[in-house]
Amino acid sequence: MKRIFTHIQKSAKSILLLTVLAGAMASCDSILDFEEGDCSIEYRVKFRYDYNMEKVDAFAQEVKTVTLYAFDKDGNFVYQKTEQGERLATGDYSMQVDIEPGDYELITWAGLDDQSFAVPLLTKGVSKREDLTMLTRRNIDNRATGEEGDNIVKRNLPSLFHGRVKKQAFTRSVQKPVTTIDLVKNTNNIRVVIAQVNSNPSQPVTRAINKERFSYAIYDDNGYMNYDNSLLEDDLLTYLPFVTEDSSIKTRAFSDEYTEYPAAIAEISTARLLDTQTPQLEIIDRETGKQLLPSNSLISYLSLLKTQDFIDMPLQEYLDRECRYSMIFFVDENLTMLKSVIQINDWILHINDIEL
């Protein structure tokens, strides 16, 4: 009788233990999540922007707003979240993602500005991954200034970034999983400088150049991006300076010492530059109607700098890492271009033997 009672006690304890474990598994969906009664799962996403020339994470310094999109394995839109402000600048920022466990494709657009970029409004259960496009707005500022022409971009575009993780598994096997999305910058600032030098270095420079003498434009059909940051078919955009000014520069292009020269400066902001495209830089003398440059190929000029200092870096990587360019072209007192020397980002390039 005593043996039977002992067996009943052991069986009861086993049943009770199984009941407790079953309850824990039902509430947590995994025994690995059961720790001191806390079954919560917190998915977090970090963002990293070190795809720059310094190769240092500059997310906290450069990104002001970030939007995360999630799509299921069939490409259906299931989740979106935007955060902005001071929290992004803390240096340890991550976004909490409230999403069910599963496999997802994560896409990020960071730096979106309604005045500069247009992204469609997505609907859960309706929108697909291919619906997530990004359009650089055009014909905004020229309406106010009376600028003629179509598809004109004439503003200092805010920094825009794209990131993508093709497959991310959010599971319950880790209580606080963190995913990192790497970002690529999609905007550029190009500073075009025309500096006047005398053909006779012994003579003082009499200023003949001014900001109104030349017109400046960059032409490229790069304003419409797909979900994966590839280009979609677009109209040819005309990027015009958002600022022009009369100034002066100091350079050692023609001597061992820094010498000051009068200059005209134009600042132009563009969308992402791709080595598969043929963006054209056009500088026109308004008095003669003639083009100043021997070649209008913007990529050719920028690739000269890569050849000088980053010869082992693929051209597209260089174009993505670098986002600010300063290009100095030199003219004589007759405002005719001196075709032997140009300066790009402090590098003085002698181009006599270089075919542009």
Image (cartoon, grey):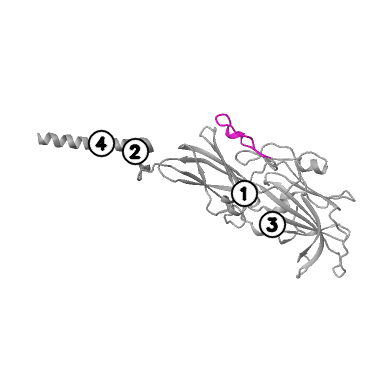
Amino acid identity at mark 4: Leu
* The one of 45 and 309 positioned closer to us in this rendering: 45
- The mark closer to the camera, 1 or 4, is 4
Which label's residue is closer to the chain start, 3 or 1? 1
Q: Is mark 1 on a helix, strand or loop?
A: loop
Q: Is residue 269 above or below residue 8?
A: below
Query: Which label was assigned to residue 24?
Result: 2
Query: Which label was assigned to residue 305?
Result: 3
Asked whether the beta carbons under mark 4 and mark 3 sit within 8 Å of each other, the answer is no
- Residue 209 x %, y %: 86, 58
Residue 236 on the magenta segment: no
Examine the rendering and report whether any part of residue 50 can be seen: no
Asked whether the beta carbons under mark 3 and mark 1 sit within 8 Å of each other, the answer is no
Which label's residue is closer to the chain start, 1 or 2? 2
Which label's residue is closer to the chain start, 1 or 4? 4
- Where residue 311 sits, quadrant-wise, is bottom right
Which residue range is magenta in the image?
118-135
The alpha-carbon separation of the residues under discs 2 and 3 comes to: 62 Å
- The mark closer to the camera, 2 or 3, is 2
- Residue 324 x %, y %: 69, 54
Which label's residue is closer to the chain start, 4 or 3? 4
- The mark closer to the camera, 3 or 1, is 1
Q: Viewed as shown, does residue 40 lie left or right of 293?
A: left
The alpha-carbon separation of the residues under discs 1 and 4 comes to: 54 Å
Q: What element carries label 2?
A: helix
Residue 121 on the magenta segment: yes
The residue at 83%/63% (across/down) is: 197
Query: Which label was assigned to residue 16?
Result: 4
Amino acid identity at mark 3: Leu
The alpha-carbon separation of the residues under discs 4 and 2 comes to: 12 Å
